Every structure is written in structure tokens, then in C-alpha cells.
Amino acid sequence: MTHPATDSRFFREQCYIGGEWRGGAKTIPVTNPATGETIGAVPDFGRTEAREAIDAAAAAFPDWRARTAEERGKVCRAFYEALMDNQQTLGELLTLEQGKPLAEAKGEVAYGAGFFKWFAEEALRVYGDVIPSPWTDKRIIVTKEPVGVVCSITPWNFPNAMIARKAAAALAAGCPIIAKPASQTPYSALAMGVIADEIGLPKGVFSVITGEAAPIGEEFCENPQVKKITFTGSTKVGEELASKAVKTMKRVSMELGGNAPLIIFDDADLDKAVDGAVACKFRNAGQTCVCANRILVQSGIYDAFAEKFAKKVAGLSVGDGLKDGVDQGPLIEEKAVEKVERHIADALSKGAGLQTGGERHKLGGTFFQPTVLTGVTPDMVIAKDETFGPVAPLFKFETEEEAATMANDTEFGLASYLYTNDLGRAWRMMEALEYGMVAINEGILSTPVAPFGGVKESGFGREGSKYGLEDYLNIKYALFGGLGK
Ligand code: NAP
């Protein structure tokens, strides 16, 4: 069954390379995870087409960087407006290929658009420095320049926003960018190609290529014309790309996996903590890098929290994201469901208790029941591995020190959350948590105006905020000598 969004002008089954729409003989089918039906197919391109996109970007770079910041800002603003004007259709397309509830999909389009709006304005603030000179006849200045051609690779869980976070900053800084979306969710990316085309971005400044990840990734990493690789996805693929990119000393940004702790202290506001934990854990069916993967609850509030939380989770409505009132869509693929099942089975076999859920949903396919486990301990697989699904494991702790130690006991360091009404404790924990981001008394923290990114094996680089632009800029130091008479 087709959906009206696939009849819209945003639904493209060709790639946008160097300002041209191009189809290919070989294609990759794209499936709606809610129905298992094929939505369509996109080109299965490889190294040759990636090289062509890079050549076009390199050719476009001199003109794009020479434009005034105001001109580039206007383009970003136009991108923002086009996304927002078409939020409904783009949201529907996103739900069709990714599965998240339409309200979340529209929220993602607005979130992604917000980066274009933010960087439209930040483009005007790429300031340099004048450094007090140690010499009477010389002066020192520092300027910022665009790094050059950028290649991005992004995952399926946020098909619009993961590209927007990168493309908006790159374009504002003066860099052409090529986007390689996840093969499961290419349509939101191709729709951004339609927007780039319609708002009149010069040829080659924004390209979208779909196809086999490994050869395209190799061309991105090995081609000397590419000056920066920006990747969001698994730590394993991130490590591979970073090690390949280092051979030509490219700039690299890595937004990788997480294993977020959400810590609830005895003195927290229980209702707020329950609401925050549900939003944090079950958004996008638990398939976000900043989803709470471990919920650590202090012993005095543990039982009360577990009861209220499980009750609320049991009330979440599961279904096709395009239907009204749905809180949780399907998981992206069968493999994802199997991972969720493995994590639950391991926890139960080691003594965890099942409060709600625990099984595939009666809707079949990749729908899974929102699940809450209690009595979870650090020896269980779920404590170490990102579940990336709708399973909330509750751990118990006694003291603040123990909470910090448990929270930091992972190689990841992306997002973390804590609920407490004690200001001193909130501050101490904020300092103790080895994470790039800490939310206090909130379950959702992403916004274009704040720096998103991790430490440890969650990667490096920041997206959004004034810091996000720096990742696309090189610093140039100029010494003006011979000023003495
Ligand atoms: P993934 O397997 O690493 O895939 C992500 C992207 O990399 C896709 O476009 C994929 O293309 C591509 N890819 C796969 N193998 C590649 C290779 N050998 N060379 C070049 N590109 C390759 O990640 P995933 O499992 O789909 O996504 C979920 C992960 O992303 C989780 O770990 C999550 O925490 C992380 N994530 C992090 C952030 C953040 O901001 N830190 C945000 C969202 C998600 P194909 O689809 O064509 O295979």
C-alpha cells in the first residue's frame, strides 16, 4: 500500500550528486519496519560515484567559501524554512522508513531544522583574534577558514537530524558536504537533496549518495580532496573510519555509541523522575544513543519508583507510527529484536525480575513490548552493552559515591542523567560523571544551541552550539612583520 508521502516531490529514488539527480542499475530496497512492506529502492552506488561527488564538492569549494557569511547564512535559513514548511510530509516519510511515531518524526524534522536556523546565525560569528604581540614591529592575528570538503556518514535512528547537525554547520562554515545516509533510511536524506536543489544551493555543495557503506566509506577516507570525515554510528565502524582517515590526516568527528546512566536519588521528585525516565528510555523505542541504558535507583526510593515507572511503561501504546495515539513504533529490524531478547534472557537467567513486557508484541513483525526489569546487576550483559531497544533495567545503589562509580563503569561517555533535589549533590555528580553531557532533573537534553557529543569511546567533536562550528574550521595564524619604520 502506498502512502501519500511517497507521491510527494520529496520522495526520490535517485541520488543527488554534483547537482544532478542520478539513478543506478543496481538498487537497495527500503522497507517500512511497521508493515514489512517495501517502500521503494534507492541506488546502490559505490566508490566511483563517491569519487564523482567528491570531485564536484572540491570544484564547488572555492566559490562557496568565498561567499559572505551573510549569504551562506541566508542559504541555511532557507533550508530551515523549507524543512519547517514541509514538516508534515517530511515527518511522514521519516516514519515510513524509520518507524518512530509521527509526532516524534515531526519533532525530529523541527529539531534538524533548528540546526540550520542556529548555524544561519552562527555563520556571522566566525571571529578571529588579535593577539598582543611580543614584538614592537610585528603583529599577530588569527583567522578561521573552512576545512574544505566534508564527507558524512549517518545512522538510521535519526535519518534527518543526524545529517542536519553536520550539514548545517558545514555549510555555514563554508564547506561543501556529501551525505551518505544509512541504507535503511535513505529517503529523509534524499528529501534534503530536494531541498538543496530547490533553494538553489550551487552544484556540488550538498550531495547525497546511497549505496554500499564500505566502499563509499573507503573513498571518503582515502580521497585526499576530502578534508574532514564526520560520522555518527557505532563505535566499531567509527574506529575503522578514524583509522583509515588518519592516513591523510583528515579532521575527524565521531558521534558514537552510548551506555547512558539515569540516576535517581532518594530525594528526587518521584513523579518527575518517572516521567523523565519514560521519555528518556522509550523515545524512538529506545533506539537513541542518549537513551537511558541503565537506570540506577537509590535504595530508599527503589520500590516506589519501580512500581510507578512500570505502571506508566505498561500503559505505553505500541503500533504503526502513522496511527494516532501511538507512543512506540517497531524496532528497525529483526536483528534489533533479537538483541533485545538476548539482553532480557541473560538478565532473567541471572536473577532479574520482570515487571512488565519482556516479549515480542502481539502485532508481530519487529514490534516489542515496552519492558521493565528490576534487580539488575553489573554482571548482566545489559549493564555493559547498548540495548538499543525498549528495555529499562533498574539497578539499586546505596550511596552517591557508589552511584558515580557504577555510572562511570563503562567505556562509553555520551549522555548521563540524574534526578535529585539536593543542589550540592547535583553539582558534585555533574563533576563526577565522566560524560560529555549531563542532564539534571530532565530526561531529554538535545537542542541545537548546546554542544552535543561524548568522551571516552563515545567519540570526540561536538555538534550544535558555537562549538559545533569550530569542528568545520581551521585556525590560521598570520604574523605581520616589518612594521617598524
Ligand atoms: P552503524 O552500523 O555504525 O551504521 C551507521 C552508518 O555507518 C550507516 O550509514 C552505515 O551504512 C555506515 N557503515 C556501516 N559500516 C560501514 C563501513 N564499514 N564503512 C563505512 N560506513 C559504514 O551504526 P548503527 O548500528 O546503524 O547505528 C546505531 C549506533 O549509532 C549506536 O551505537 C548509537 O549509539 C550510535 N549513534 C550515536 C549518536 C551520537 O550522536 N553519538 C547518534 C545516533 C546514533 P549502511 O546503513 O549502508 O550499512
Image (cartoon, rainbow, N blue to C red):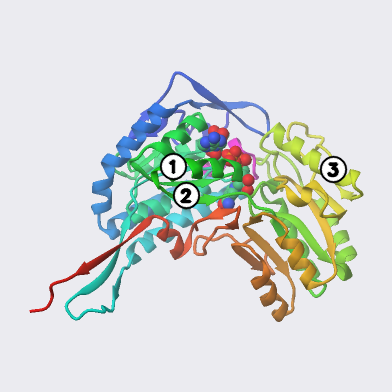
- Name which residue type carries label 1: Met
- Name which residue type carries label 2: Ala
Mark 3 residue element: helix
Disc 3 residue crowd, few under 14, some 14–19, many 20+, Cα 10 Å? some
Q: Residue at x 45, y 59 (%)?
A: 468
Q: Nearer the viewer, mark 1 or mark 3?
A: 3
Q: CA distance from mark 3 to mark 2?
A: 37 Å
Residue 483 appears at what percent x and percent y?
13, 75
Disc 1 residue crowd, few under 14, some 14–19, many 20+, Cα 10 Å? many
- Name which residue type carries label 3: Asp
Q: CA distance from mark 2 to mark 1?
A: 9 Å
Q: Quadrant of residue 21?
A: top left
Residue 413 appears at what percent x and percent y?
63, 58
- The numbered disc on residue 220 is none
Dot placed on the residue nearer the N-terminal end, 1 or 3:
1
Q: Which is nearer the eye, 450 or 34?
A: 450
Mark 2 residue element: helix
- The numbered disc on residue 346 is 3
Magenta: main secondary structure equals: helix
Eyeballing the image, is 61 above or below 56?
below
Outermost residue, top side: 25
* Labels 2 and 1 touching (C-beta < 8 A): yes
Q: Nearer the viewer, mark 2 or mark 1?
A: 2
Q: Which residues are magenta?
A: 89-101
